Image (tube, rainbow, N blue to C red):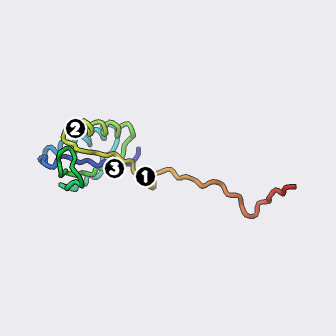
Amino acid sequence: MRPYEVMIILEAGLEEDAIRAVLDRSAKIITDGGGNPGRVDRWGRRRFAYELHHKWEGYYVLLEATAEPATMAQLDRMLSLADDVIRHKVIRVTGSNAPRVRPAAVPAADAPVAEAG
């Protein structure tokens, strides 16, 4: 299982029940896929830097989850088809769970050097 963050921008004029319905569907997809929906951070209504789909405001929600990539692909598809979602982005979180890259081997200072000759 991998950690993910999902940023969802919903239409600003939605009622609380419609927002809750989108978040419940998202959590259900994650749990049905064997994942664990984590913290839901509601940022609220924010103004866009530019016009999106003839709108200037949106309701921002950040959803944290741990799931398999196939489950997050299903969530990505559901959010792209939802009418209430203006934009969304699924991001895999890297950090302590990320694989460590080892540097190339450097010869030791006291190792014998082959002489040309």
Q: Amino acid at mark 1?
A: Thr
Considering depth in this image, is 117 or 61 the residue closer to the camera? 117
Q: How many marks?
A: 3
Q: Residue at x 36, y 46 (%)?
A: 66
The disc placed on residue 82 is 2
Q: Residue at x 26, y 40 (%)?
A: 79
Q: Residue furthest bottom?
A: 109
Q: Residues within 10 Å of mark 1 (few under 14, many from 20)?
A: few
Badge 1 marks a residue whose secondary structure is loop
Q: Nearer the viewer, mark 3 or mark 2?
A: 2
Q: Residues within 10 Å of mark 2 (few under 14, many from 20)?
A: few
Whole-percent x and y of residue 2?
40, 46
Asked whether the residues under the numbered discs 1 and 2 touch, taking CB atoms below 8 Å apart as contact, a structural biologist would say no
Q: Which comes before the other along the chain, label 3 or label 1?
A: 3
Whole-percent x and y of residue 21?
18, 42
Real-space CA distance between mark 1 and mark 2, rounded to the nearest whole angstrom: 28 Å
Real-space CA distance between mark 3 and mark 1, rounded to the nearest whole angstrom: 10 Å
Considering depth in this image, is 96 or 14 the residue closer to the camera? 14
Badge 3 marks a residue whose secondary structure is strand
Q: Amino acid at mark 3?
A: Glu
Q: Which comes before the other along the chain, label 3 or label 2?
A: 3
Residue assigned mark 1: 94
Badge 2 marks a residue whose secondary structure is loop
Residue assigned mark 3: 5
Left or right position of 13 against 98: left
